[in-house]
Image (cartoon, helix red, strand yellow):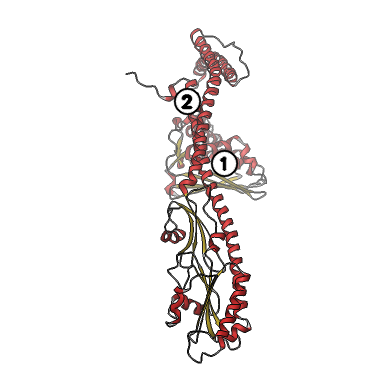
Amino acid sequence: MPKRKPFLQWKIRTQILVCMMALALIVALTLSFGLVRIANNTLETNYRVTCENNLSVVNDVLDLRLNTIVKLVREAVFSDDFQRIIKMPNIYNSPYFDTDSNQKLDAIWNEMEYQNDLLDSMFLFDLQGRFYKRRLGAQSTSNYQIYYTQPQPVTADWYQKAQEAKGREVFFGKDVLDPGQTNARVSMVKLIYDPADRTPKAMVIVCLRSSLLRKLLPQSDRYFKTSTFYLLDEADRVIYSSGNAGLSDDEVGQALHSTQDNGYLLSSTESSITGWTLVNAVERKELNAMVNRIGLSAIALAALLTLVALVLSNVATRYLNRSLTHLKKLLEEINRKGGSIQEDFDDSEIGQIGRVLKSTYNHNLALQERMLKLEVQERESELRLLQAQINPHFLYNTLDSIYSSAIVSHDDQTAQMVASLSGLFRISLSKGKRAITVRDELTYIQRYMTIQNIRFQDRFALIVDVDDNVLDLTILKLTLQPFVENAMIHGLEPKIGKGYIEIKGERIDDDLYFTVSDNGVGVEDLERFYEGYGIRNVIDRIHLFYGPTYGVEIQSTPDHGTSVRIHISAKEGNTNVEAGDL
């Protein structure tokens, strides 16, 4: 089985086609999944907002209708006739109101019934043991007959809540006097007080028709089969529901307050009158079914986009491959036959690459010819240099002869100058070494100063204050001398009268610090120091040999002198640097 080539060894056209296909596929799939995700979030958000707005409208209508009933009941129970009835003493401890009171209560009920078609029944317990009942039309009241014969339901939960409300209306999603009632009926319970002394007098219960909820609350959503509306009381018990959602009555309250995803999207709003919660629930998978259709469309679009990208890539790479093949054949032919490239290229990017290759190739040919000529010239120069070279020993011997002649002639000054010059040459050459000891560097400087003092009649003093533990350490050759020479030429020679150069040296940890200072004329522009070749060369050599963290600091004050601080390492520097590089 042949070994499969790595991707980078495939043809450029194939690489481009594969990359374009992969890129188009990645972009299309990312776009598809992103579109599905965005559509899903948008659909859920829009559905929730729409439901909450609709529920808010329904809730406002429900509150409005209930508020109307509340006002109607308040007007009735605070009327003069009603107040006189509940204040009338029960002399005979009868469970019935007298005939006149019953007639007046009937008249009050008839007036309320006439003004609001949602009223179903009214019941009255006064705190003296009397009970009154009245239902709409000819509805049976047999289920309520027991309240004439048994004590008042003061222990019932609804009775206790009404007392705790202290006259505020309390709503219940059932017939509190007939819990077995199957119809979705709403009860409003209110404790009646005497306006004069704020003492409780009676408990009134008004039941509303079950059609109140059926008419006002929304039915199932025709667009979503699982959409269901629930009305929950303050204890999250279901009062009314419509729809086909799979949530049971016990699960609605838990799902409403749970942070976990139970497979349903819930929207809710709360009534300000009853404290009840109106909830809409719909299964997420039904909402997502619409998004899935969008996803399938997006995937189909992705496939189409990939196909279009393949066709376009094939057309584009065909032209590109033709140009690259032509360029490859041209280079192979030139490599085989030699000579310069004479081909003319177009202005396309491949053509521009061809022109660059042409220019580079032809330039390299020209460089090869020039290097061949330079190599011949270099050989000739080496021959001439070898012929003109002077043996250093011949130079030293000649200087020694001049020194001996000066001694014989009793010319001490000439002898001293020749001896110093001979020492300078010996240290400068140093047998080709790039580094010397600090002691040898200072000896070199002392001989240099000897020659200068002979020239200038001992005008200059050299002060050396270098720690003994520094003298035998090695430093780059000619590290200090150029600064001494610079101080002599630019600082002391222009100065009138005597002058001095002081050299200090110390070791701190693994670093050496030298200071070369003079009392010469000084300068105002420090850039002048860096213009000279000697100083610039020393700084570059320090950076090259010891590293960029080491170097030179220069301070100068006109008419007071100059101070140069040299910072180098006490260890051996860059050993890869050749002597010729320094």
Picture layout, residue 399 above or below residue 379: below
Q: Which x, y percent locates residue 519? A: 62, 49
Q: Earlier in the sequence, mark 1 or mark 2?
A: 2
The dot on residue 483 is: 1
Residue type at the position of mark 1: Phe
Q: Residue furthest front?
A: 138
Residue type at the position of mark 2: Val
Q: Residue furthest bottom?
A: 91
Q: Residue at x 52, y 66 (%)?
A: 276
Q: Which x, y percent locates residue 537? A: 56, 35
| Closest to the observer, 267 or 30 | 267
| Closest to the observer, 516 or 193 | 193
| Closest to the observer, 40 or 434 | 40
Q: Is residue 544 left or right of residue 84?
A: left
Residue 74 placement: quadrant: bottom right
Of helix, strand and loop, which one carries label 1? helix
